[in-house]
Image: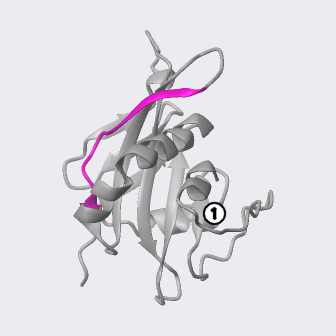
């Protein structure tokens, strides 16, 4: 909400119920939720032509580039030598009703979602210049303090991958 306030955007905060049910067919919607918390979000992510968000056989969550097969996992989940970092999915996806789109932020862990907010606070204009109003998705990485969970840095792990209109 801090970024929205700095940009002088009005909005309403709504919490997703524990059932994970959410109506994605609304104008100007930004959702912060992952596929493990909401079947609705999991279904929306399955339709992304560029990235998939799935659980690996070892139980870790990953974001996978569909074309190259490159796998992105949270540095904090590394089996050995884990470091305080996370990853997140960020994208603009078509609404289920086909009458617009919504923004989705889905960290592997909650701090990954904060990493997207950090990234946007420093790169929003550049990102908009690249994607405009087209649907896209990308992977964002971030570093954070182990004591406070405050994000200290963020970066693109993939470029903004445009969704081709068919």
Packing grade of label 1 (10 A; few <14, some 14-19, many >=20) is some
- Tell me, what colour scheme is on the image? one colour
- Is residue 97 inside the magenta stretch? no
User: Quadrant where the C terminus lies?
Assistant: bottom left
- SS at badge 1: helix
Asked whether 46 or 137 is in front, the reply is 137
Left or right relative to 3: residue 121: left
Q: Position of residue 74 (x, y in %)?
A: 45, 30
- Name the residue: 45% across, 47% down: 121
Q: Quadrant of residue 20?
A: bottom right
Looking at the image, residue 106 lies above or below residue 29: above
> Is residue 162 at least partly visible in the picture?
no
- Name the residue: 23% across, 75% down: 164
- Is residue 155 inside the magenta stretch? yes
Q: Which residues are magenta?
A: 150-161
- Name the residue: 31% across, 66% down: 49
What residue does disc 1 label? Answer: 39
Looking at the image, residue 132 lies above or below residue 70: below
């Amino acid at each position: 909400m801090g970024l929205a306030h700095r940009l002088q955007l009005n909005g309403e905060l709504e919490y997703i119920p524990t059932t994970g049910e959410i109506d994605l067919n609304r104008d100007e919607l930004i959702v912060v939720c992952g596929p493990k918390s909401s079947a609705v979000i999991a279904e929306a992510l399955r339709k992304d032509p560029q990235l998939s968000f799935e659980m690996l056989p070892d139980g870790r969550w990953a974001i996978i580039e569909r074309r190259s097969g490159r796998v992105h996992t949270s540095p904090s989940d590394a089996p050995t030598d884990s470091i305080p970092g996370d990853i997140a999915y960020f994208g603009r996806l078509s609404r289920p009703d086909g009458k617009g789109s919504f923004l989705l932020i889905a960290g592997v862990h909650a701090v990954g979602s904060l990493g997207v907010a950090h990234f946007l606070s420093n790169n929003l204009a550049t990102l908009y210049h690249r994607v405009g109003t087209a649907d896209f998705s990308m992977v964002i990485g971030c570093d954070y303090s182990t004591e406070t969970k405050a994000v200290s840095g963020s970066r693109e792990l993939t470029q903004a991958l445009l969704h081709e209109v068919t």
